[in-house]
Amino acid sequence: MVIQLTTENFEKEVLNSELPVLVDFWATWCSPCQRVAPILEALSKEVIGLAKIAKLDVDEQYELADQFGIMSIPTLVVFKGGKVHQSTIGVQSKETLKKLLGI
C-alpha cells in the first residue's frame, strides 16, 4: 500500500520510521508522475516489512516540498533513520528503486 503523506503524518510515517521510506514528490498535473504511480504501487506490495512507499503531493503539501528543496517532479527520495539517504529525479524502474532502498 502506498501511503499518502501530509504535514500531519510526515513525521510519524517518514522521520520516525524504523524502515527505509521511499517518498515520491509528485503532482496531479505531472505526466511523468502518473507513469511512476503504478510502479510504486507494485513495489509497495513487494517490500512489505522491508520498506515503506509513500507519495507527497507538492501542490497540497508545498511546505514539505520546499523544506526538502524539491525543484523538479517526480523526485523520489529515500529516507533512512529520518534523514535523506538518496534521491533521484524522473521515472525510474522498479529495480532501480529497489536498489535505492537497498533491497
Image (cartoon, helix red, strand yellow):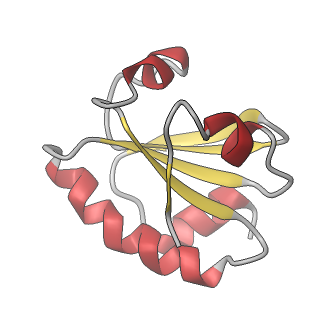
Q: Is residue 34 above or below residue 81?
A: below
Quick check: 37 left or right of 88?
Answer: left
Please give the count of numbered marks on the rendered protein: 0
Quick check: 28 left or right of 67?
Answer: left
Quick check: 84 left or right of 2?
Answer: right
The residue drawn where x is 67% and y is 76% is 47
Q: Is residue 38 above or below residue 55?
A: below
The residue drawn where x is 45% and y is 68% is 40
Quick check: 54 left or right of 100?
Answer: left
Please identify the quarter of the rendering in which residue 83 is found. top right
Front-lying residue, 98 or 2: 2
The residue drawn where x is 69% and y is 59% is 101
Q: Is residue 71 above or below residue 86?
A: above
Q: Where is residue 1 in the image (x, y as percent from the top left)?
A: 53, 73
Q: Where is residue 79 in the image (x, y as percent from the top left)?
A: 70, 42
Front-lying residue, 90 or 6: 6
Quadrant position of the C terminus in the picture: bottom right
Q: Position of residue 13 (x, y in %)?
A: 68, 48
Farthest front residue? 8
Front-lying residue, 38 or 3: 3
The residue drawn where x is 56% and y is 74% is 44
Q: Position of residue 70 (x, y in %)?
A: 42, 24
